[in-house]
Every structure is written in C-alpha cells, then in structure tokens.
Amino acid sequence: MAITKQYLKSKPVCKVTFSILAEDAKKVSVVGSFNEWNAKATPLKKLKNGTFKGTVDLDQDNSYEFKYLVDDAFVNDDAADAYVWNDFASADNSVVNV
C-alpha cells in the first residue's frame, strides 16, 4: 500500500494517489471523508501487476479519514499518516494529511 502526494503550485490542492496491492480482488475503491464514504465515488483501476491505483484532488491544509474497500471488506493503509478511532465503525480509520 502506498500514498503519494503532489502539491500544485497554481492552487491550494494536493493530488493524492492511493494504491493497494490486491491481486485477487475484483473491485477496489477508496472511501473517506473526502467523498462522503461513497463506495462508487472513487473506484481504483487495476494494473497488470495486481495493484489498484487512483488519484484524488484534495484541498491542502486538511486531514481526511479513509479506507480501502476491497471486494466489500474495509482495509486500512499501512502507509497512512495516522490512524483515528471511529465510533460509527468501531475501528480505526486511516488518515492522510495534506
């Protein structure tokens, strides 16, 4: 799992690329506070090596909670900037700071 960040000079936006290795998965999406936890909002594309990858534009100077949805199972990112407890899910969520 990996997160890469590319800050734009022209506006206060960061292009965040989410990627997760899930060779046997049929579908993967990233859900979080930036897309209202909508499983259909940010699907990731499967690459030939079995990695799913996608990029989201996020406003700078914010923190966002997220998880990967891998074939209907929620997965945290090992490369997250932090983790925060979520009472609704009764589990930790990954956090990305931009």
Image: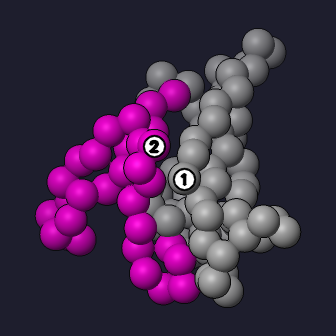
Tell me the residue at 23%/47% (across/down): 84
**Which amino acid, mark 1?**
Met
Tell me the residue at 72%/48% (across/down): 55
Q: CA distance from mark 2 to mark 1?
A: 6 Å
Where residue 23 sits, quadrant-wise, is bottom right
Residue 93 is covered by the magenta coloring: yes
Tell me the residue at 70%/63% (across/down): 51
Query: Where residue 53 appears, x then y in whole percent?
Result: 71, 58
Q: Which residue is mark 1?
A: 1
Q: Which residue is mark 2?
A: 79
User: In the image, is residue 16 above or below residue 73?
Assistant: above
User: In the image, is residue 83 above or below residue 35?
Assistant: above
Mark 2 / mark 1, whichever is N-terminal: 1
Query: Where residue 90 appears, x then y in whole percent?
Result: 16, 69
Is any part of residue 33 visible from this angle? no
**Which amino acid, mark 2?**
Ala
